[in-house]
Amino acid sequence: MNPTLKCMTVALAATGLAACAPSSRRAALIEENVAVAVQQIGMLADSSELGGAIRIPSTYKNGAIAYVPTDDWVSGFFAGTLWYMYELTGDEQWALRAQKHTEQLDSIQYLQWHHDVGFMIYDSYGHGLRLKQLPGYDRVIVQTAKSLSTRFREVPGVIQSWDADRGWQGERGWQCPVIIDNMMNLELLFKATELSGDSTFYRIAVRHADRTLAEHFREDCSCYHVVDYDLTTGEVRRRCTAQGYADESAWARGQAWAVYGFTTCYRATGDRKYLDHAERVADFMLHDAAMPEDLVPYWDYDAPNIPEEPRDASSAAVLASALYEMYTYTDKAAYKQDADRILESLSTPAFRAPVGENGGFLLMHSVGSIPHGSSIDVPLNYADYYFLEALLRKERVEADEPLF
């Protein structure tokens, strides 16, 4: 499906690189990006393994790579990036590296104090299981689903995202905050039911998705970042933001999480309401007046200083990947065309770093959280992860091969 690329013939004018011939036809855009990724991600992996230690690169700022601990929400993305490099190149060295970076996350299967274990474990162990059927990886996924299920709150029918009594979250007066990002963790639960036969995980995922669909969205299908529920009555206490510009604004990455998350729910359940909703949110993202022509959004659709506001390449990459999957279910050519446009934009010097720069990260100009003063206009490991995922999906769509 994804042939080995020992070397490539593409001449990379933007980088001055040359490579030798691939073993089969492949879109020039994919060839070029894989050639760049081999160099960039290889450099980043080398830096992350200096001295034999395995560290998790998160971003690059002030001339240095920033690393995070295993319990950080972004800890699984670099392992996932390495798995995607294996899938894109067929080179077993990437698989060996991916396995090392995956298995350092073993303890996360027992983490219960936040919801992001789906990102952390499914994007690492999930790919290792899918690509290599590595022993024990299925057990890690199921145990992680058990840990995530401890955060399900029966009365409101949702998985609580953050504990309301710790850190800055403890200062907001919340009882049961649920963020739109949590839609991205449901794929882990669906997989755990498939692996274990225990339908509990599936039912939790569906209940969470249904309540989120009902409560998180405005009439124009833009979404709130945070909805806080009453644990006693199950009613909504407040709709607000944590990482967007304002409570009533449309934070770009939140919209992309919604498109991707509800598309995943359709894949897992076959329930058309999820795909219809993903389409509505995607249409808002793509056609809102604040979306630039190159389809790489500003960090918030309602940020006050557009067009001087920072762009967010990570939101664009997530959206592109979701659009390719949506295209396979709807056969609407516009979704593929828009996904292609995003990848073309991200592959230009405006967003893709020159080889040897950016600490080894592929994409520049992403935004973590402007309200928290965190990771503003920098590379982010999840931007690279979803960019590579989108490239893989593009290749399969154009080869008329299944995505999964």
Image (tube, rainbow, N blue to C red):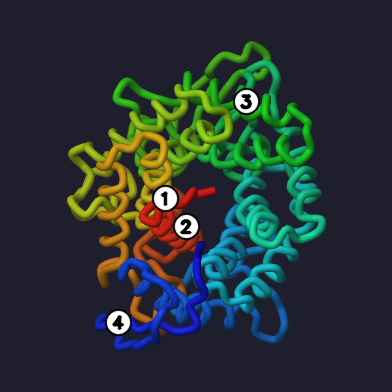
Distance between mark 3 and mark 2 Cα atoms: 28 Å
- 277 relative to 104, above or below: above
Label 2 crowd bin: few (<14), some (14–19), many (20+), radius 10 Å: many
Residue 101, position as x, y percentages in the image: 68, 68
Q: Is residue 105 left or right of residue 207?
A: right
Q: Earlier in the sequence, mark 4 or mark 3?
A: 4
Please report the residue visible at 53 percent of the width from the left and 19 percent of the height from the top: 237
- 382 relative to 8, above or below: above
Distance between mark 2 and mark 1 Cα atoms: 6 Å
Disc 4: which residue: 12
Residue 138, position as x, y percentages in the image: 77, 50
Disc 1: which residue: 321
* Foreground of the two, 26 or 225: 26
Label 1 crowd bin: few (<14), some (14–19), many (20+), radius 10 Å: many
- 156 relative to 141, above or below: above
Disc 2: which residue: 389
- Whether tag 2 and tag 1 are in contact, CB under 8 A, the answer is yes
Per the image, label 4 sits on a secondary structure element best described as strand
Amino acid type of the residue tagged 1 in the rendering: Ser
Label 3 crowd bin: few (<14), some (14–19), many (20+), radius 10 Å: many
Amino acid type of the residue tagged 3 in the rendering: Val
Amino acid type of the residue tagged 2 in the rendering: Glu
